[in-house]
Amino acid sequence: MTRTLLVKTHAFGDALLSTPAAAGLVEAGDSVTVLAGPSSLPVWERMPGLDAVRTAPFPPRGAPGSLRLAAWTLRMRRSFRGFQRVVYLGRSPAVRRWLRLLTGADMRSGGDEPLGEWETVFPQREDELASAAFARMAGVEPDSLTPRFPLDPGEMDRARKRLGDGRWLAVAPGGGENPRDSVAEKRWPPGRFAEVCRAVTDRGTRVILLGGPRDSVAAARVEREVPDVLNLTGTTGWGETAALTAAAGRFLGVDSGPAHLATAVGADTVVMFGPTAPGCLYAPGLIRPVLSPAECSPCYANMPFPGCPRGGGCMEMITPDMVMEALEPILAGGGGQ
């Protein structure tokens, strides 16, 4: 049995995309420990079959964060010896050197060029599906590229009681934030979310708003314009958010952590795309994409966002009518779990 340290420290959505690779390693018989950061920990805590989950103060933010990580590394280095290999689902040279210092083990990574004889690299190809690339880096072929986020029966029971009877659409009106970067260009205007939510409620489907505390301003705008929505933005953890999304059975949002979570729990999912490419982030059949008609869209895939030289605007070219057209089949369907 190979002792493997699997590393995907952040962010929540990226960790979800890594779960098929982790499942493949477990199915292959490896003893898998995951090294997580705070933002990815909720994913790995639920992953079945892992030997352990360890946490690091990662990613470091500024000089204080780097000092905390250095101190943690010196304190924990001895406890990370004994792994036979590291599988790093990323490409950062700095992180690869850090992991070599921490473990002393041979490594598989998504780097462009090996940093030493101890590393074998599997560069991510342009336009490659991220979950498939992560599986290739890990050297496995999982039976499914659908993200994993198991729910327990108690979570589902509480979510169903919270929603009660009726038809629901879970909506995440924020997005574009993670510990690595902030991409305002991925967001859709709150006023347009409100317009869609109003049309959805007029058709007899109720709306629940979900997301983190940073999404509260956008959700408040929707709530002001559509008083019938149930606004739980900023009040639920990832587990409760997942259960409520699964109970609703339908989801609308931008490319974000909540959208990846919706696919993991089997909701019928509509996702809007401006700068990002759906084919790089969602396995075929998991979502109904709404694409910006901007000529420059999409402009990046899975690397840190380089910034928009045109000042954004691609998401604003997605109209409420385009979104309602994509929602039509799921509003007409059964939904719910």
Image (spheres, rainbow, N blue to C red):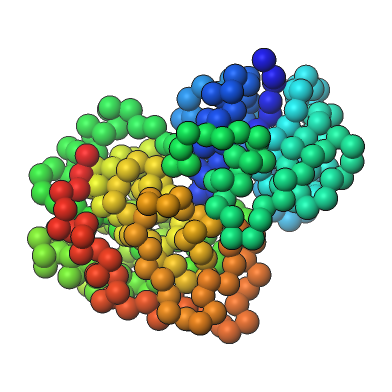
* Quadrant in the picture for the C terminus: top left
Residue 31 placement (x, y as % from top left): 63, 19
Find residue 296 and report its image quarter. bottom right
Find residue 99 and report its image quarter. top right
Is 142 in front, or is 190?
A: 142
Find residue 30 and report its image quarter. top right
Asked whether, in this view, residue 9 is left or right of residue 192, the answer is right
Residue 258 placement (x, y as % from top left): 41, 52
Number of on-image labels: 0
Is 23 in front, or is 127?
A: 127
Q: Pick out the residue farthest to the bottom.
A: 310
* Quadrant in the picture for the N terminus: top right
Asked whether, in this view, residue 172 is left or right of residue 175, the answer is left
Q: Residue at x 73, y 42 (%)?
A: 109
Asked whether, in this view, residue 70 is left or right of residue 297, the answer is right
Q: Residue at x 81, y 31 (%)?
A: 106
Residue 46 placement (x, y as % from top left): 46, 30
Residue 11: in sight, yes or no? Answer: no
Residue 217 placement (x, y as % from top left): 38, 66
